Amino acid sequence: MDRTDLLLEQQPFNLEKKEKDKYFVPAITEAINFHYNHSIEFRKICDSKGWNNTFNSDIEKLPFISVNLFKKMKLISVKDEDIVTVVKSSATTGNNPSMIYLDELTRKRQVKCLNSIVSSFIGNQRINLIVFDTENTIKSNEHSLSSRGSAIRGMLPFAKSVTFILDDDLHLKTRALEEILIKLKGQPVCFFGFTWLLYKIVKDISPINFPESVILHIGGWKKLSDISVSKDVFNKTVSSSLASVKIYDIYGMTEQLGTVYIDCEQGYKHVPNYSDVIMRDVGTLESTSEGFIQLISPVPHSYPGISLLTDDIGKIIGEDDCLCGRKGKYFIFKERAKNAELKGCGDTLK
């Protein structure tokens, strides 16, 4: 068993920093050595930063790739014939989508990672899943899948039943919703969807009385922030419409599937044992408490997505002492950087 698989055998939130490092540092060391030796592009970035392929356990010194680089070139660390799925992110205006190439090992790790993290929040009992999306979203096209489709597929192992309640034009299938609510009356339900799409639908529907339901939502806030919908407004709107007492906001990205960061009862996103998070100053890129979010995970094997600098802004709140009882770092997502362009990573490869 390699170091990453040994790391994934641990529970997601039970280790304080000193104990976590015993598993995480060897795993990320093994991962960075692998990608340095198998990805020409990653090696060039490392070399340009003076990285000499040695690691002294200082996570903050790890070289990183801007997530935007995955929109511009094919980044891969295995043979083409080993790729089983290509996941495409949702492209923002004027940008190409990120293209993430998965082999079977990476895909299995992602599933295990996601299952452990989500189960620690919602439990191991299978749920009745009502998806605010169209079923066509999870259908792959010649081994290619959208990020929405990948996220929904990731939730299917938790489901006792699955109902998609949007048509192909992303409009609510009112009758389908009414029928499933009657069928599941008295049973716990989990509503799942992408943040902006979920809000778009539920803000106009009549309140649903499912007091034992929970809401899981994932995806960027940009579309909602553009129309001045805050997290507080979102929570009040969807909880009122769906009568839910628990809302779990999931932060994650296509470029590092499986590793997600979920709000706890205190409203903070928790870093599992399988990853680390660093904030970098928006001007200097030095490590700080608030800035660009850098996500570090040894899970990716088929592509060098182990250390990613995002254009999201976050703030570290604390470590190992959250009142919810979970160990590890915890942070808040603040906003997507406005008009920010991450320099340096791509310039090396021109």
Image: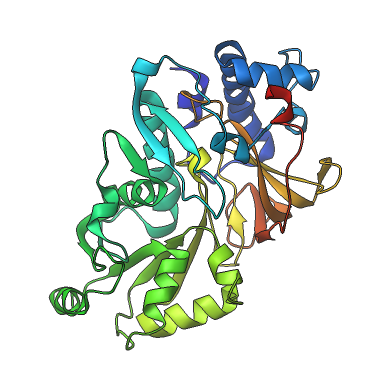
The outermost residue toward the bottom is 206
Residue 87 quadrant = top left
Return the residue nearer the eye: 59 or 66.
66
Task: Name the residue located 81 percent from the left edge and 41 percent from the top edge.
Answer: 285
For the C terminus, which image quadrant?
A: top right
The outermost residue toward the right is 284
Please provide percent x and percent y for residue 24. Answer: 60, 29
Please provide percent x and percent y for residue 138. Answer: 28, 49
Please provide percent x and percent y for residue 148. Answer: 38, 52
Residue 15 quadrant = top right
Task: Name the residue located 73 percent from the left edge and 42 percent from the top edge.
Answer: 342
| Total numbered labels | 0
In this rendering, does residue 131 appear at all? yes
In this rendering, does residue 186 appear at all? no
With respect to residue 242, does 25 lie above or below? Answer: above
Task: Name the residue located 40 percent from the left edge and 68 percent from the top edge.
Answer: 215
Left or right of residue 3: residue 177 = left
Left or right of residue 114: residue 307 = right
For the N terminus, which image quadrant?
A: top left
Task: Name the residue located 46 percent from the left edge and 41 percent from the top edge.
Answer: 257
With respect to residue 155, does 167 lie above or below? Answer: below
Left or right of residue 211: residue 117 = right
Render colour scheme: rainbow
With respect to residue 249, does 105 lie above or below? Answer: above
